[in-house]
Every structure is written in structure tokens, then in C-alpha cells.
Image: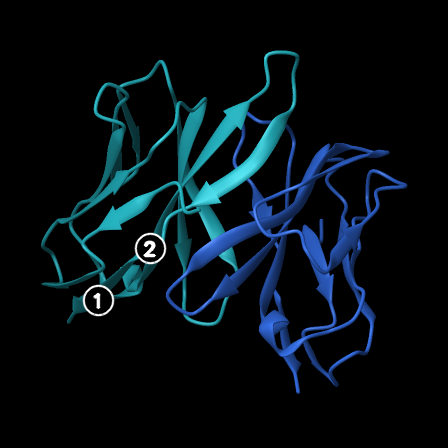
Amino acid sequence: NAGVTQTPKFQVLKTGQSMTLQCAQDMNHEYMSWYRQDPGMGLRLIHYSVGAGITDQGEVPNGYNVSRSTTEDFPLRLLSAAPSQTSVYFCASSFSGTYGYTFGSGTRLTVV
Amino acid sequence: SQQGEEDPQALSIQEGENATMNCSYKTSINNLQWYRQNSGRGLVHLILIRSNEREKHSGRLRVTLDTSKKSSSLLITASRAADTASYFCATETMYSGGGADGLTFGKGTHLIIQP
């Protein structure tokens, strides 16, 4: 099993550009979520999903969109990149709320 | 806002000693989880304790949960240099109709094990 795969690992964007961070899992997990990690801030929840076709906002959703058309994939879209979105982004999945989450290795995004 | 707050923010001990980290949270939860993050890497799930449990063990890890005080502690016994990492607590709240609202993390404790 590959677990949770995030692509790309690194990305540099110019202010105003859009892009999609990819996240795929092969464990048939229903729960998937996106987090950003900034220095000294821990991880903050952006968006989450409890199954295909179901998404909801987390703590810091502004500037990001998600969709969940399949169980396996949960892409995160940056609509118009801003320097404040410079961060490390992590995708995670879980079988259900009573199990721990498996995290991807992260995408380091820099917006200039 | 951050749900959990770890204490201390940083901890340096000698190899072989025990390391204790504490976590406090604000709202009612269904479970509390601890994760480890090595520098520049993803998070690794260590242990999950449900709200109706008071203590849980996994290898050299011992977790306690006090829901009346909204606090948890993680004890790592007989520490090793490889335990050097950041440790995060995270809480999860379940909806009554099923589903969950993702994890809410604290800011973490940076643990350094001196050889």
C-alpha cells in the first residue's frame, strides 16, 4: 500500500496564480482532511470530508476549495495564491473517527 | 483557534530518562490522539485514547486522559535518541449522527534526547 500520496512535494507560485494540490489514498478511508502547518502554529484544519460527495470547512478555509468525487482523491485548490498561503500542506485520511489518521509527506508551498 | 496546548513547548533530556508531555484542550471531545513529527516529515500516529478511557499503553508509550480537567499526558519511557521529534496532541469531535469534524491540533512539544 502506498498510503497517502501528496503531489507535488514542492511548489513556487506567483501571487494570483491558481493551482491544485493533489492527495490520493489507497486504503479505502472514508475520512480525509487538509491541514496547513506554519512555524509555531501547529497544524490547522482547512477542509475535511467524511465521504465521497461530502465536504465541509475547517478552521482556515478562506482561499481554498475542495471536492470529493471519489473515495480515493481529495484535491485542494488554491483559487488565487497569496503570500499568506506560504506554508506546508498536509493531507490525512482515516478509516473512521475512532481510528488515527495517516498523513502524507506534505507539500511545501511558497507564494512570491 | 487551537484546541490543544502542549506543555512544555520544548524538552531536553538524557537518553534513558522518561519524557512527559502534557496537553490541555477546551471543548468536549470523542477522542484525543498523539502524533510524532520528525523534522521536515509528515506526522505519524502514535496512540488514540477515547473519551471514556483513562489510560492507554502502547510499547514505551503511556497516555492518560482526564476529561474533567480537559487534559492528557504522554509518557515516553526509556527514551532513545530516535525519539527526538516534535509531539502533537490532537482532538476529534464526533457528530451524534456519525461523522467527525477533523483534528484540532496543539502547537506541539519539541523533544530532544541527548545521547
Which residue appears at 88% of the width and 40% of the height?
A: A70
Quadrant position of residue A8: bottom right
Can you say which quadrant of the picture contains the C terminus of chain B? bottom left
Q: Given the image, on which type of amino acid does mark 2 rest?
A: Gly
Q: Which mark is residue B108?
A: 2
| Picture colour for chain B | cyan
Residue A21 image point, x, y percent: 76, 64
Instruction: From the image, state the color of chain A.
Output: blue
Query: Is residue B97 left or right of B10 when viewed as pictured?
Result: right
Q: Which mark is residue B112?
A: 1
Q: Can marks 2 and 1 be said to lie on one chain?
A: yes
Q: Secondary structure at mark 2?
A: loop
Residue B59 shows in this picture: yes
Helix, strand or loop at label 1? It is strand
Residue B66 is marked as: none
Q: Nearer the viewer, residue B32 or A80?
A: A80
Q: Position of residue B49 (x, y in %)?
A: 38, 26
Q: Amino acid at mark 1?
A: Ile
